[in-house]
Structures are given as structure tokens and as C-alpha cells.
Amino acid sequence: MENQLFYPHIHWTSFKKFLLRFGVIFFFLPMLQILSYFDDHLYPWIANVVFSIPEISLEPTSSGDRCFNYIELFVYFVLAIVGSVIWSFFNKKDKTYDTLLHYFLIFIRYYLASEMIGYGYAKVFNIQFSAPGLSKLLQSYGDSSPMGIAWTFIGASKPYTVFSGLAEILGGVLLLFRRTTLAGAMISFAVMFNVVMLNFCYDVPVKLHSTQLALLAFIIIICNGHVLWSAVWSNKAVATVNYKPLFQKKWLKITAMIINGLAIFYFIAYNGYKYHQLAYELGISAPKTPLYGIYKPTQYIVNNDTMGLHSHDDQWKYLILEYPGFATVKTLKDSEFYFELSVDTIKKTMIVNLQNDTSHKFQLSYNEINDSTLNLKGKLSTSIIDFTFRKINLNSFTLTNRGFHWINETPFNK
């Protein structure tokens, strides 16, 4: 009979052993990517035969909650059940799975730590959430999606975004050390359960992955939290936890220490450096596109005919230059269309084309008359345009200029 060096408090029933077998298979199957070779045929076939879904998209997107993902989850669940039954049939001699559980928990806490630290850095460096973009500042609440509202709410406050990121990093770092594993799991579960509720309640398509991370944190708590349970709920004195060495041989101990040190360096230092660099490429510190800003027409001349600023619905209401290579135009009837453009800041020209028509390109010249005035002229489609714009001061929006106040005589709730 195997000695229970790590979890002597666990009484290994047949059901608990089956759960562990299931957990090991269910966790490692996606990592092995064995089924990825059959994606094109297996998952569409299962969707059609089992769920009567005639067609599913296999094209990857930024959503983690595609129909494909749910079919994939179902396949892994079934395979884990079948694999656990087979494993149970051929492995009846082991009375305890203490060592297997220990290694399994090491893998999942390192995996969870990696995810928590990565997501934390993405928040700290304002990559996942950033201040509301130019188009978002002009968008009405009624036209926003629930996810858009959540992203705006979190991104509007950089201190809150950084705070939530630091909480995730703290949970992840504590998971990297055996003596602080329980504290790290508790912090990670609290943080991730809030994320899970946010994803479900605001329809954020990361429901499956966030639920997985919260579940992994909960498993670590269940397996390590017997001391906490006794002290808090049973009001009993508990013995000091005796951390048994994972290996007995000296060279194995040294090897394990080196691997652990490299893992800690990678998760904390390298990830920190990587996300810091990403902040200069994609985040708040990334270079702005030339002429970055929101522009409102003050003069509208088409084919040498000066038109009133509200003379027809298709007239431009705003020109938004937010992302490199793109421009957004909002019309008076609140519809939008998009340009692809390249700006030559030396010649003061831009080459533009409608996003859905790359075969017709037009050259426009621009002139920054002063810090707040832009003139744009040239041939666009079949018309000769001469537009003058006023650049909107971004601090004129309440969302960006309200700031923090210790004292509020009345609630400022617009």
C-alpha cells in the first residue's frame, strides 16, 4: 500500500479515485492536442449527429465561446468519462492516489499561476482594458453591447484596472510556492469568480475559460483547505502542516529547485517584460496614428458648392482617426462607414479607399491650420471635397474629465 506522504487527510474511496482519473484526463487532453488533426471532420460530424446542428464555423475568432468550443468541451468530457472507466478497470490495486494527486495539483497550480499572472499584467499595462476609445466616446449607451459597457466601465478607471490586475498577479505568484498555495488559490478563486459572474452577466465570450480557471482554484482549495475548514468552521486546533519533500535524492531536489526557479522567473519576470513591451505596441503607450482625434465639420464644400452643415442625412457628422490605417465617418443619421488610409506626414497627403472597395483609391491633401483646425481637400469618389474640421478636445467629455473627488456634496450620476 502506498504511503500518503502529501495528503494523509484524504480517504480514498472509489468515487474519489474516479474523480481524480477523470480530472487528469479532462485537464491534459486539450493540452495534448491529439484531436486537432481531426477538427475539420470530427467536430462538424458530432455537431450534426449528436446536436442536430447542420454546420459550425471552424474559423478561429477572439471569442472563446463559439459553438465549436462547446462541441469540443463535450468531446473531451465524453473521452474523459470513457478513459476514466477504462483506467478504473485496469487499475484496481492502488489503494491511494496520493502521489498522482500531488503531481496533478502541481501542474494545475502552475498552469493557473501562469494564466493569473498573464491576465494580471495585461490589466496592469492597460492592454486588456484601456481608456474608452474615440468611437466609444461618441457612442450612446443604447447602442452599446453589455460587453462594451463592461469594458468601458473597467477601462474608464486606470487605478481600478491596475488594482484588479495586481490582485490576479498576487494570486498567481502565491500559487508558485507550496507554503502559500492555499492563500494563492483563495485569492485566485475570489478574483476569478468575480470574472466569471462578469462574463456571464455581461455576455463576455470568455465564459468557458474563466469558469475553468475558477474551477481549478476551487479544486486546489478543496485539496489543501482541510486545515482552514477545521480552524474556521469546526473551531478545532490544527496541527502544523508538514511539507514532505517531493524527492529524496539530492540531485533530484536540486533539479526540481532549478526548474521551479526558472518557472518563477518566466511567469513573473519574463511575462512582466513581455506585457510591458506589448504596452508600447498595442496598449496605452503605443504610438498614435497621425492626426489622431475626433473631428467635427465646420465647413462642408462639395464640388465648389458650400453646403449647410445639416443639409442632408449622409453628411459627415464626425471624422474619427483612432487606429493606424483606418478612419471612421459618422453621418448625421448616425450610420457609419470606414476608410482605409495611409498618411504621408511629409507631403501632407493621404491615400484613402472605402474599406469594402480596395480597387478605387483617392489622394487627399490635408492642412493642420492650427492645433484645433484641420482642412481636407481633393477628389473623393466622384466629388471634389473641401472640408474644414474642428478637432474636439477629448477632455470635454465628462467621462474623461470628471476625475476623482474626496468630497461630493451630492452624487454626480449622469
Image: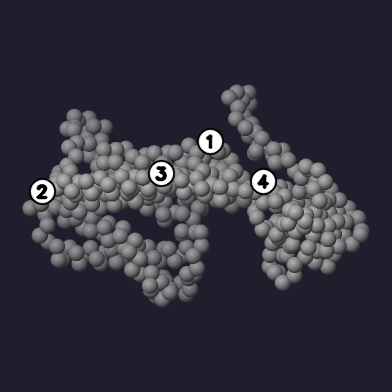
In this rendered view, identify the residue nearer to me: 9 or 371.
Answer: 371
**Residue 269, numbered circle:** 3
Instruction: Label 4: state its secondary structure.
Output: helix
Give the mark, 2 or 4, whose residue is nearer the N terminus. Answer: 2
Instruction: Label 1: state its secondary structure.
Output: helix
How crowded pointer 3 is (Cα within 10 Å; few <14, some 14-19, many 20+) is rated as few
**Residue 3, numbered circle:** 2
The picture places residue 331, in percent across and down from the top left corner, at 76, 56
Q: Is residue 115 visible?
A: yes
The span from disc 3 to disc 2 (Cα, nearest Å) is: 38 Å
Which callout, 3 or 4, points to the residue nearer the camera? Answer: 3
Per the image, the residue denoted by label 4 is 137
When asked about the image quadrant of residue 209, the answer is bottom left
Amino acid type of the residue that numbered disc 3 sits on in the rendered structure: Ala
Tell me if residue 393 comes above or below residue 381 in the rendering: above
Which callout, 2 or 4, points to the residue nearer the camera? Answer: 2
Give the mark, 3 or 2, whose residue is nearer the N terminus. Answer: 2
Amino acid type of the residue that numbered disc 2 sits on in the rendered structure: Asn
